[in-house]
Amino acid sequence: MSELEEFADHAILLERLSRVEKAHGKAKAELRISRDQASALAAERDGLLARISVYEKAAGKKPPKWLTPKAPKKKTSATVVAVLSDTHWDEVVRPEEIDGANAYDRRIAELRLKRFSDKTIELARDYVAGVDIDGLVLMLGGDLISGHIHDELVESNEASSLATVVHWSAQLAAAIRQLADHFGKVHVPSVVGNHGRMKPGKPRMKGRVRDNLDWLLTTMTANHLAGDERVSWQIPDSTDALVDVYGTRFLLTHGDQVRGGGGGVAGLLPPVFRMREKKRTNTPFDVMVIGHFHQLNLAAATGLVVNGSTKGPDEFSRIFNFKDEAPQQAFMVVTPKYGVSIQAPIHVMDRQKEGW
């Protein structure tokens, strides 16, 4: 091979080397990108699996073992049960329309939710003695949002229903974190109400729960708290949730299935008791917990607890002459030996702080 031929061959080799190095560099870059993409996809997959796990575990899940131990750790064991329902978040009540009896909007509702958490902790800490509290059962009893089942609500609500769900799922998650910080363990059974229905008109029977914005709000809240091992969920696809606390069986349902009666909860007690007995034919339980009527009735000894509301009096209650009731929710202490041993209202309104 002549010197010229060797030079030409060397030039070809250098050109090939340049192409190979460029290709190698490109391959390394693509590999790096692929690895980064793979890592990002893996993280997204893990996040999705965690979210899916929350929904699947919560659907129809039984209460955690700490609520149903074979034998209580101590004779003084107790669990606090607080009911949160009929909050009607993002409904607006103007005091001038009801003779100054109440006011309600998003700002006031946030203050009342915070007061609900604070007062639940205060009652358990300062007014319950001689017991060792194992944790908290926070029952979500439906009608958490105002919704759009009536035209006047669509016109007067502070936000659209979906915007309401997004905002309040974060607020509710923050409240549950605060409760978990104090109680250590929080179990959250949840049922839907009637105001969260997606479609106005006659309530549907098929797919009733997952076609309700209360279900969406609760599952979004569970997603906010997916990594918090202190919090467990019970979000059934039925309208009722059976909650066992040391052998005392609570049936949580919203209460809008009651038919008949009138004049507030007093006039409705007979049909409520009839519904309670009808439900017992299918599901044995000790105490039925309902909301819907915005009139607190703590009567666990009779097998019934009716929750109040955080909204308080409104135009509807005034026009139909229902007795004004202060915004309040139900508080109970359950023990293994005596069942529901203490009942008290959680007062959630502070008019001075609310500024109306």
Image (cartoon, rainbow, N blue to C red):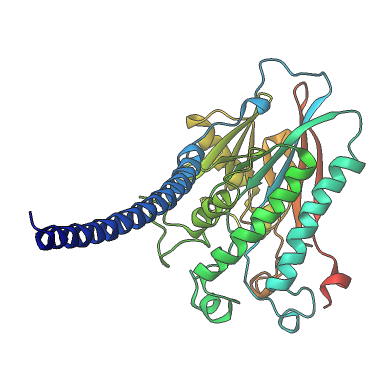
Residue that appears at 49% across and 59% down:
213
Residue 275 in percent (x, y) is at 54, 42
Residue that appears at 50% across and 43% down:
54
Which image quadrant for residue 308? Answer: bottom right
Residue 27 in percent (x, y) is at 30, 54
Quick one: which residue is furthest to the bottom in this view? 96
Quick one: which residue is furthest to the front in this view? 2
Between 240 and 125, the one lying in front of the other is 125
Q: Is 308 situated above or below 226?
A: below
Q: Is 305 situated above or below 23?
A: above
Q: What quarter of the picture does the C terminus occupy?
A: bottom right
Judge whether residue 238 can be spotted in this image.
no
Q: Is 178 situated above or below 285?
A: below
Tag count in the figure?
0
Left or right of 326 on screen, residue 220: left
Residue 67 in percent (x, y) is at 67, 28
Residue 140 in percent (x, y) is at 62, 49
Judge whether residue 292 can be spotted in this image.
yes
Residue that appears at 40% across and 62% down:
202
Left or right of 339 on screen, residue 150: left
Q: Is 259 situated above or below 93?
A: above
Which image quadrant for residue 124? Answer: top right
Which image quadrant for residue 233? Answer: top right
Residue that appears at 70% across and 70% down:
321
Quick one: which residue is furthest to the top in this view? 71
